[in-house]
Image: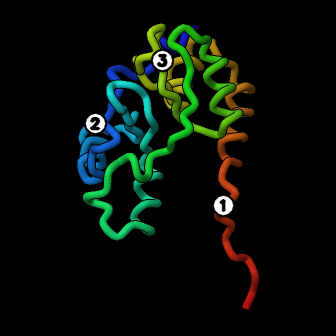
Amino acid sequence: MTVQEIMSQPVHACTINTNLAAASDRMRATGCGALVALWHGRLAGILTDRDLALAIGVMRDCEHAPVGEIMTRVVHTCRSSDDVRIALETMARFKVRRLPVLGVTGDVDGMISVDDIILWAIPEGAIDTSALTDALRSLCAASTAYAPDTSEG
């Protein structure tokens, strides 16, 4: 099964100059947790709901700040012709839950997420549950930046 068969389309996007309030409104309106950020029509970054949440704590004027200030610039992608197993392996390796999907011309054609794989690839037998479990373990272990204080006192 290829990525193209299960990716979400159309891709939800903004530009790097879109303000964060507008980007947040777009996420809410479309029910998605990430927008691809474009610059002159090409992939420049990705803005996730987590990026927005973290920006609230450090920025004075989140509402008017442009997406380009907080987006993730290093974006891991896959191709629409890739097998879904390759996409899942990429997600696990780089500890990301979503990948923009590039077509043959390099344009962003869609987005594939762990949710898409669970909803569509597992029932079709394109991914076995042990591969999914391994990938999810890797994703769940992704964040080591926050560790709750377990000391007493």
Image: 47 above or below 60: above
What is the secondary structure assignment of the residue under circle 1? loop
Q: Amino acid type of disc 3?
A: Leu
Q: Which residue is mark 1?
A: 145
CA neighbours of label 2 inside 10 A, class few (<14), some (14 to 19), many (20+): few
Whole-angstrom CA distance, mark 1 to mark 2, is: 29 Å
Residue mark closest to the camera, 1 vs 3? 3
Residue nearest the observer in this picture, 125 or 39: 39
- The residue most toward the front is 40
Closer to the chain start, of discs 1 and 2, is 2
Mark identifier at residue 102: 3
Q: Quadrant of residue 81?
A: top right
Q: Residue furthest bottom?
A: 153
Q: Position of residue 44 (x, y in %)?
A: 44, 34
The x and y percentages for residue 96 are 59, 38
Image quarter of the N terminus: top right
